[in-house]
Image: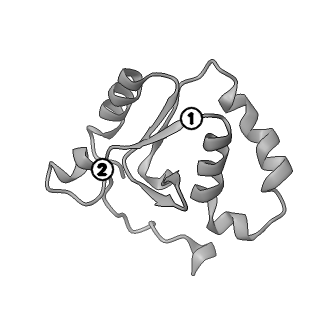
Amino acid sequence: EYLPHALDELLREQLSRGPGHVATYFAYFMRGLMVPQGADIIALQFGDGVVESIPAFHRNFVAGDRACFLVDDLWIGLFLYTCGKTVTSLRDLVTARGLQMIYKRTGNAKVGALE
């Protein structure tokens, strides 16, 4: 369950940065690639064909590879990089509130496929 302010704040931050950016609350670097973490919400703007390109990228590079389920954040980060998008972490907005996460864990938070 995401905190009440999460979506409004993310939208505001995304729009202020423009379509060349992708905003997320948490991201990490891996070999120079900024990787957004999907459970922490990813926001990007429509209109430049990026969203429409996701299915083709998935078919060509991800579909059928069971390991990609476990590294979904990584392949999404790679996709965004190949589209020329800059991933921006908004972690400082979360930690400024004294929080570690942008959501509250719920009883159904377990992912069976990972256990």
Q: How many marks?
A: 2
Amino acid at pointer 1: Lys
**Marks 2/1: CA distance?**
18 Å
| Placement of the C terminus among the 4 image quadrants | bottom right
Q: Is residue 92 left or right of residue 72?
A: left
The dot on residue 3 is none
Q: Residue at x 20, y 53 (%)?
A: 95
Quarter holding residue 88 = top left
Residue at point 27%, 40% (across, down): 4
Q: Which mark is residue 91?
A: 2
Where in the figure is residue 58, as x and y percent of width and height?
A: 77, 48
**Left of 85 or right of it: where is 27?**
left
Residue 114's spot in the image, x, y percent?
59, 76
Quadrant of the image occupied by residue 67: bottom right
Disc 2 vs disc 1: which is toward the camera?
1
Give amino acid for label 2: Arg
Relative image position of residue 49 (x, y in whole percent) = 70, 24
Q: Residues within 10 Å of mark 2 (few under 14, many from 20)?
A: some
Q: Element type at marker 2?
A: helix
User: Image point 77% across, 40% down: which residue?
Assistant: 55
Position of 99 relative to 5 (above/below):
below
Color style of the picture: one colour
| 35 and 55: which is toward the camera | 35
x 61%, y 34%: residue: 84
Tag 1 residue: 85
* Badge 1 density bin: few <14, some 14–19, many ≥20, Cα 10 Å: some
Instruction: Between residue 78 and residue 59, name the one nearer to us.
Output: 78
**Where residue 30 sits: x, y (%)?**
52, 62
